Image (cartoon, coloured by chain):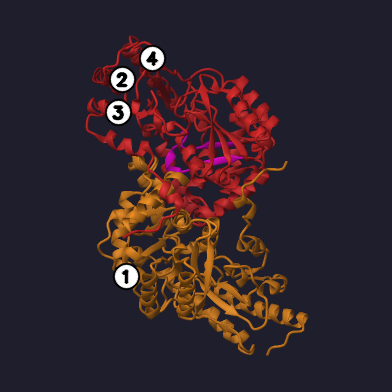
Chain colours: A red, B orange
Amino acid sequence: MEFRFSKLAQKLKSSMIRELLKYANVPGAVSFGGGTPDPETFPRHQLAEIAREVIEKEYKYTLQYATTEGDPELIKQLLLLLRRIYGLDGLSSENILITVGSQQALELVGKVLLDPGDYVVVGDPEYLGALSAFRMREAKFLVVKFEKDGPNLDQIEYHLKRMQKEGELSKVKFIYVVSNFQNPSGITTSLAKRRALVELAERYDVLIVEDDPYGVLRFKGEHLPSIMNFGGTDRVILLNTFSKILCPGLRIGIVVADKQIIRKLVLAKQGSDLCSSSLTMRLAARYLERYDVLEQVKPAIDLYKKKKEVMIEALKEEFSDVCDVDWTDPDGGLFVWTTLPDIDTMEMFKYAEQRKVFYIPGEAFKPYEEPSSSMRMSFCLPSFDQIKEGVHRLKLAYLDYVEAKGLKCR
Amino acid sequence: MEFRFSKLAQKLKSSMIRELLKYANVPGAVSFGGGTPDPETFPRHQLAEIAREVIEKEYKYTLQYATTEGDPELIKQLLLLLRRIYGLDGLSSENILITVGSQQALELVGKVLLDPGDYVVVGDPEYLGALSAFRMREAKFLVVKFEKDGPNLDQIEYHLKRMQKEGELSKVKFIYVVSNFQNPSGITTSLAKRRALVELAERYDVLIVEDDPYGVLRFKGEHLPSIMNFGGTDRVILLNTFSKILCPGLRIGIVVADKQIIRKLVLAKQGSDLCSSSLTMRLAARYLERYDVLEQVKPAIDLYKKKKEVMIEALKEEFSDVCDVDWTDPDGGLFVWTTLPDIDTMEMFKYAEQRKVFYIPGEAFKPYEEPSSSMRMSFCLPSFDQIKEGVHRLKLAYLDYVEAKGLKCR
């Protein structure tokens, strides 16, 4: 049977991560692949009890359709939480939309801002889920290097100037940036760059979409003001999610934006799924009311901190003799980004597979397809021992690969 | 602040239903507006207990990310249920996708099948959520009259022939039909028309999207084979939902289709929201495992049956003296469709508002904007007395309107 799929569907490919993660279930394997949090960090007893309660006592809400905007009780709690996390005052419920995870937020932002052929400024590397949401809208990417302190601003300005010269500036809709502990690189955009990004965006009249799923998972250093703190809702759309600070299973994402933008996003969501689950929204609301989520998440942050330290130690031990090797040492989040000289991490993958260690090749995070010598290594799920063992295997795989290809450590 | 929204966003309007339902909260009002089930029919005690259990014992699944296809345990239960409801054998898990309610299913079907300018055959009247999902893909509608026994087949054939003549047949992607107790009309497509629809679809090589959220809510008469029973997964995509037989708060929709189509839908869903809530999916799975949902829903069906009877009785009592008045008397579902001669139910709405009774004007269900002399009257939420009182008020509003406009009962 030949089906006549849409052009969009013909282009849809399974994400590389999804395909590669299949290998990670090999017995005895160590996986640095998935970016899923450790389920032992989820407050399951509390959530179990609240779930029972909100179904018994609030069934008229929790089992019924919700409004598209989201549970008003959750929005109330979120306004308090946004104030605590970001110091954002002056927001009202009309500035908030609750989505099915961050991914829906990205897709809705794409729908309301992007026409086919419009441009988005993205990093290299960049979060895959954002790239795929914007690709669904047939957007084009203006790519800038993601450096150790955030996006290369000169490159952003170069792109914007060029577009202006070509009379295409109005088609550049926004700059997308994961501001804290970026997926995949672990990089945090510096304070200076946050300010400068807003200035640039104002000068060229483009929006900024600030995505911050990991900001709360900070191991060390000071919490930085968000880009929205500098730009406000006139200039910035802020995305957040409960997936990393509470748990992903509730599928709760958050958009903070200007009221006009929220209204459009609500209309787009109406056509997408009518509304999110009232049960999971109310469950999150009552959890936030009763427990201090920022306190509750501290053991998880401690755990990730230690795991990251173990990974960095192991990398030093195993890879210090490889010249020009480089890794990020993030102050939070879930990912270390390791770059090896002269190699293609996609090619190296089969050697890693033989050594039973898995990572995500950097190619997955390229806005346009091209090889990469980097890899994303997630430290959140494997145990301490597995991390050490995995990095050791990675070194062996690297040596296998280098030998097979006749490469030499420079 | 002027935001540069996409063309799609500029076209997005709030649904008329949503706007009108705001009036329904007026104190003392009777609303026939919403199509939401009665929350007293939800098995809250069972769901509360299972929710507690699946979070406590299966937290590694229920609080974590799910796969995009959906919970395998739920899919297992669904295969059994689809067999019981439709007698559909030979399906495997690869024929199933779980979505965030039926609305997401509609939007994903639109994404994978429709390019801008493609055609969909729809009824007049038609389910609003489907129209808006297809409009998001910039589809055009080939409209056919929805008669007392389903879509007018001659009109479908006329459209298809014309498109063939114009060399545009390949742009007609599917025929959309709510096969049982259609929203808004309450009409069930007859057995003969189901067969004939498949023949037509095969002859002209178009797909059929059969949407069946209400089929289980049958008050009387025999359950009819689904269109998919005649056409199979080669020809038919079947949509269903738990919103009406269990509860809407879990946001669980189902697509049954050919494996190739499911694969494309999965990829589209990946970009839309990564995955549905593992918690609500597993909750539904364990509920289906432990309870017979088709037994559990019987009291709800009885209740809706009685409410419908009260509404039909009231209509007879109040409106029998209005010549050419017409209403459907559905064998199931949630809606009665009432048509009054020579009036515009949108215009009449303000008279109804003064009399504190609410309905949804037929205009909301027109594929292309035009006035309608029909209205959707939902009987599931108001009490017996409210139904009687509401129909009485409706008559008064009708008389007010007729008088004000100088119309005469023909």
Q: Which residue is mark 4?
A: A325
Q: Which residue is mark 1?
A: B229
Read off the magenta span.
A238-256
Query: Could you classify mark 4 by the number of other residues whose Cα lies within 10 Å: few (under 14), some (14-19), or many (20 or more)?
Result: some
Q: Is residue A246 magenta?
A: yes
- Is label 4 on the same chain as label 2? yes
What type is the residue that disc 4 sits on?
Val
Q: Which residue is mark 2?
A: A391
What type is the residue that disc 3 sits on?
Phe
Q: Which residue is mark 3?
A: A349
Viewer-closest of A4 and B380: A4
Evaluate if marks 1 and 2 touch, with contact meaning CB atoms under 8 Å apart.
no
- The secondary element bearing badge 3 is classed as helix
- Depicted A318 relative to depicted B315: above or below: above
- The secondary element bearing badge 4 is classed as loop
Q: Quadrant of residue B238?
A: bottom left
Evaluate if marks 4 and 2 touch, with contact meaning CB atoms under 8 Å apart.
no
Position of the N terminus of chain A by quadrant: bottom left
Task: Tell me the chain of label 4.
Answer: A
